[in-house]
């Protein structure tokens, strides 16, 4: 099998050979003197990634500690969009920014559009319809708990 990429260096190990057996595909080649075999199996649905866990509209239910940006006072909702943007709905209006989710960890970097605020890293987890965020790189515990929301706030 030959996959050509015009945006990166050529693969030093060359092309994979492949074979198909039933609903499985096997790729094989030699890398650094060792035989490598990759087994692929047909799936019905793509697996969810960390970004999928974070995406959606969330209503603040509980908070602990203080944070300059995700301060609990006046915060009602967090909206995480598919395109890398997020919005905070507060009693005094809406602010936003862009986010970056780490590829192999449930951590998100929030980069606010507001110049006075620094970017911040949060670890996150989901349990059912609840989303929990905890600020990283701080000695104090700062956490926010949200629940799935189906309607945007009025403001």
Image (tube, rainbow, N blue to C red):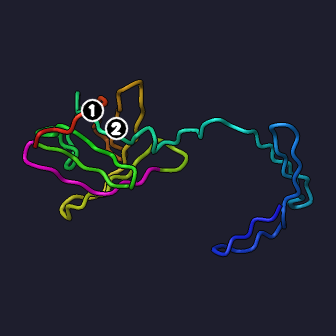
Residue at screen point 92% across, 59% down: 33
Which element is circle 2 on?
strand
Q: Indicate whether 66 appears above or below 150.
A: below
Image quadrant holding the N terminus, namely: bottom right
In which image quadrant can residue 3 be found?
Answer: bottom right
| Residue 31 x %, y % | 86, 60
**Within the image, what quadrant is residue 8 found in?**
bottom right
> Which quadrant holds the C terminus?
top left
- From the viewer's perspective, tell me whether residue 42 is left or right of residue 80: right
Q: Residues within 10 Å of mark 1 (few under 14, many from 20)?
A: few
Determine the main secondary structure of the stretch shown in magenta. Answer: strand
Q: Is residue 94 magenta?
A: yes
Q: Who's the residue at 21% across and 58% down the image?
A: 117
Residue 37 colored in magenta in the image: no
Task: Name the residue beneath numbered marker 1.
Answer: 150
Residue displayed at 27% across by 32% down: 150
Bounds of the magenta segment: 91-101
The residue carrying pointer 2 sits among few (fewer than 14), some (14 to 19) or many (20 or more) residues within 10 Å by Cα, namely many
Among numbered discs 1 and 2, the one appearing first in the sequence: 2
**Residue 13: image tag:** none
Name the element at disc 1. Answer: loop
Q: Residue at x 67, y 75 (%)?
A: 6
Residue 64, position as x, y percentages in the image? 23, 32
Specify the quadrant of the image occupied by residue 72.
top left
Percent across and percent down for residue 35 are 91, 53
Disc 2: which residue? 134
């Amino acid at each position: 099998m030959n996959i050509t990429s015009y945006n990166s260096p050529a693969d030093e190990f060359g092309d994979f050979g492949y074979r198909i057996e039933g609903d499985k595909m096997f790729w094989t080649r030699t890398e650094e003197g060792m035989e490598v075999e990759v087994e692929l199996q047909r799936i019905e649905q793509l697996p969810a990634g960390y970004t999928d866990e974070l995406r959606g509209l969330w209503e603040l239910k509980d908070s602990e500690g203080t944070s300059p940006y995700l301060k609990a006072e006046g915060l009602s909702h967090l909206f995480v969009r598919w395109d890398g943007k997020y919005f905070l709905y507060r009693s005094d209006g809406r602010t936003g920014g862009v986010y970056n989710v780490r590829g192999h960890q449930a951590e998100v970097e929030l980069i606010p559009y507001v110049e006075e605020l620094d970017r911040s890293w949060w670890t996150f987890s989901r349990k059912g319809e609840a989303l929990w965020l905890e600020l990283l790189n701080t000695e104090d515990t700062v956490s926010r708990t949200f629940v799935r929301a189906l309607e945007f706030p009025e403001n």
